[in-house]
Structures are given as C-alpha cells and as structure tokens.
Amino acid sequence: MSQKTLAESGTEGAVEAQSAASSKRWWILAVVALAQLMVVLDATIVNIALPSAQADLGFSDGNRQWIVTAYALAFASLLLLGGRIADLFGRKPAFLIGVVGFAAVSALGGAATNFEMLVTARALQGAFGALLAPAALSLLNTTFTDARERAKAFSVYGAIAGAGGAVGLLLGGILTDALDWRWTLYVNVAIAVLAFAGGWLLLNNHRDATNSKLDVPGTVLVAGGLFSLVYGFSNAETHDWSSPATWGFLIAGAVLLAAFTWWQTRAAHPLLPLRILLDRNRAASFFAVLISGAGMFGVFLFLTYYLQLNLGFSPTKTGVAFLPMVAALMVTAQVGTTMLVPRMGPKAVIPLGFGIAAVGMAWLTGIGVGSDYATAVLPQLIVIGVGLGLVMPPAMQMATGGVAAEDAGVASATVNAMQQVGGSIGTALLNTLAASAATDYLAGKDASSKLVQAQATIESYTTAFWWSAGFFAAGTLIAFLLYRRGVPEQDADAAPVVHM
C-alpha cells in the first residue's frame, strides 16, 4: 500500500473517530438534558397537584407551602457542595448517585402517607438535585469544547432550564387529571431510569480537582447563608416583613455569606474560588440568571392562578396554555447562542432579551376579569418567551464557559444557585406584594361581592406582573452596564474535553 493511500486511510479513520465522538457528545447532551429536566420539573410539577395532595393527606394551608419550600431550601443550600463533590470525586459518580437518589426519594414522596413523610421526601429531592444539577451542567461544559457545538448544546440546556417550569405545570396537570397527584413524583422514576442508563453507558469518570480537599468551613458558611436567605424570603410569604422570622433570617443569611466570601480569600482549597467571580462577563451572567429567575416565577405562579381561577382552565389546559411561550423560548435560545452572541456579543443580545421580556410582562398587565386567552395572554406569553430565550441560555453558557476544568462543577453550581435563589426571592416578594395589592383594593369596598373579589385578584396579579416587568427592566440596565463590549474570546484550553 502506498504512503498516500496510508495517509488517506489514516485521515478517514480520524474523521470516523471524530464523528463517533461527536455523536457520543450529542447523546451525552440528551442524557444531561433529561436529568436537568427532572430537576427543573420538580420546582413546579408538584404545585398543580398540591390541592389534591392536601385533600388526601389532610395537612393545613399553612403547611402547604413547605412542600414547595423544602425542595428549594435543600437544593439552594447544598448546590455549591454538590458542585465541589463533582469536581473532587468525579462527575460520573456524582451524576449517577444524584439520579438514583432523586428517583428513590421521589418514590418515597409518591408513597407518602402523611405530611411529614412528603415534606421529608421533598427536602431529600432537593439534596440529591443539588448533587445532580452541577454535575450535569459541568459535564456539558467539559464535553463540548468546540465553540459552535458548545453554543448549540447550551441553547438546548438553557431552553430546558427556562422552559422546564412550564413543562412541569403541563405534566403536573396531565398526571393529576389523568391519574393521581402521587404520579407527579412517581414520574421521576421513569425519567431517572433513562438518565441513569445513558449516564452509565456514555460517561467516563474524570476528576479535575483530584489534589484539592473539601472546604468544610466554607461549606457550612455558604449552606447556612443560602438556607437563611431562602428561608427568610419564604417566611415573608406566611409571616410579615416586620417578623423576626423574616428579617432575622435575612440578616443572618447576609452575615454568613459575607463571612463565606472572607473565608474564601483565606482557605487553602476554597469551595468557590473567587477567580470564578472576577471575570466581568461571568459576574454579569450570574446576575442575569438571578434576575431572570426572580422575574420568571411571576409568569408561572400568577398566570397559573389566573388561568385556573379566573378563566376556568383545567390543570392540563393551563399547562398547554404555556407551551407557546416554551416554543418561543426554545427558538430564540438557539438563535441567541449560536448566531447572535457569537456575532454581536452579550452586551447587545442579553439586555435586548431583558427589554423584550419587560415589554411582554408590562403588556400582560392588561388582563381583566372577562379577558380572552387568545388576545390578553397568548401574544404576551410569546413575547416574554422570545425575551427570556435571549437571556437565559447565553447567560448560562457565559457563566460556565472559560473556567478552569477543576472549577467547572462549582461554576455550574453557582449558576444553579443563582437561579434558585432568584426564584425564591421573586416568589416571596411577588406573593407579598400581590397580597398587599388585593387587600388595598378591597379596603372600603363590599368584600362579599364576587365581582369585587374577582377584581381584587386581578389587581394582585397585575401588581405582580408590573414588578416582574420592573425586574426585567433592571436586568436590561445591569446587563448593559456589566457586560464587556465585543464578542467573547473562546479559550479552547479552559475546559478540556472529557476523555472518552
């Protein structure tokens, strides 16, 4: 065989190997996306099932919020620890243990015979989710090193992170209507079987921070700080802003997080190396994820109430009503990450997305007691979806891109923590403001009149929408000021490809 023929056959073999690795990468994306969907679903899927679960298990209205809050508390407080565990002990075991644990405690929650059993299962779901979510995102960051492929992968991941809440509402509605509230938890077992099988076959164990040690003081400080912050905002919904249970925990959270930041400058093996936060584009991206998380919950939470209580939609129909927003978000996620940001840079694209979302939210405040979904809700949802699609996937990509491989897990965890804390802050603030608006509207009016009551609820929803629009408007300004001009540089050596 001639040298030329040998060279040609060698080139063909290299191309085939590269093609096989590339197709394997896309299967890894499918597995990671499935696992991420399971984690994001569980922030909202149980919401629609809560009335049925409450009737079945007989717990009080006051306890009802803890079914949602227990998940958020455990998830937010343990995320940075989960991310560091993935870096230290390998992403494959962290991912697989997270998937199996999540499925097991979901089954426990589905089989719950009382409130205590259900709330424990939800807290454990949050704990395993905190191990699973950073491992999944950092796998994506280290698997896709080509700039174009990474942009496509993050557009899919970001769209799922953004739209998963709406998909949770749809799936929660269908399962509750067709089967039973318990299936909103049992469904995770089916998703987990697929994610585990894919992870076991496709992932290779790769540890990038093998010489590091776990930062125990940092872990305690940040877990305590995030717990106090989320717990304080959650208490604002049920207590009052003047209650020590609210401001006491908020102050404690701020103090603990300040102590954590100080400790990270002293620790030999910091849990969150501050070099991750020093890049302007990355810091701007963390803020963008935080603000979009805070504003987005206004859409899901209050629009769910409006569609079901005011327009008489069933749980399933409510979920379907959100799908146009999901579709718009997924389309612009692809356009934003693969075409706009690489050409125009984040300083042009992300503030534009926030601006569009703010317009959509402000437009949504036009709803009334007898409004029609097709004219008063649908176009506005599509506009909001377009805006968020230009914010979340590019911000998530920029928040984790360019970090050293040994920091990929903890950078990913920080993104998830920002979204979770943003969602908790947004939910608490908007709930409190909406309740105050309804009370103010009823003052001096005939509260026994059904029309007056309906108008009061509309007043509460529109107040929440105006505040969400305000969050997005603030996001426009902050993103514009913080992001650097120009197209971000690609650092090919930052997060090397996982050895396959």
Image (cartoon, helix red, strand yellow):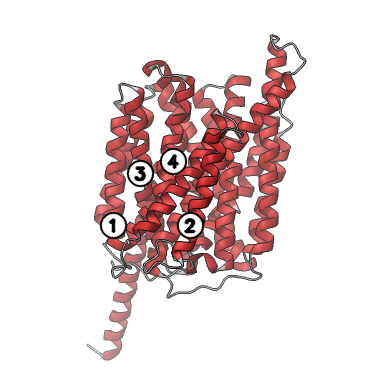
**What type is the residue that disc 3 sits on?**
Ala
176 is higher (above) or lower (below) than 21: above
The answer to whether the residues at label 4 and label 3 have Cβ atoms under 8 Å apart is no
Q: Earlier in the sequence, mark 2 or mark 3?
A: 3
Q: Earlier in the sequence, mark 1 or mark 2?
A: 1
Marks 2 and 3 sit apart, C-alpha to C-alpha, by 23 Å
**What type is the residue that disc 2 sits on?**
Ala
Q: Earlier in the sequence, mark 1 or mark 3?
A: 1
The answer to whether the residues at label 1 and label 4 have Cβ atoms under 8 Å apart is no
Q: Quick one: label 1, few (<14), some, or many (20+) residues within 10 Å?
A: many
Taking depth in this image into account, of 124 and 11 the one nearest to the observer is 124
Q: Earlier in the sequence, mark 1 or mark 4?
A: 4
Taking depth in this image into account, of 3 and 424 the one nearest to the observer is 424
- What residue is disc 4 on? 73
Q: Which mark is residue 92?
A: 1
Taking depth in this image into account, of 24 and 403 the one nearest to the observer is 403
Q: Residue furthest left?
A: 1
- What residue is disc 3 on? 127
Q: Earlier in the sequence, mark 2 or mark 4?
A: 4
- What residue is disc 2 on? 259
At x 45%, y 40%, the residue is: 72
Q: Is residue 241 visible?
A: yes
Judged left or right of residue 239, residue 68 is: left
Pick the quarter of the image with the N terminus. Answer: bottom left
Foreground tag (1 vs 4): 4
The answer to whether the residues at label 2 and label 3 have Cβ atoms under 8 Å apart is no
Foreground tag (1 vs 3): 3
**What type is the residue that disc 1 sits on?**
Lys
Marks 1 and 4 sit apart, C-alpha to C-alpha, by 25 Å
Marks 2 and 4 sit apart, C-alpha to C-alpha, by 20 Å
301 is higher (above) or lower (below) than 18: above
Pick the quarter of the image with the C terminus. Answer: bottom left
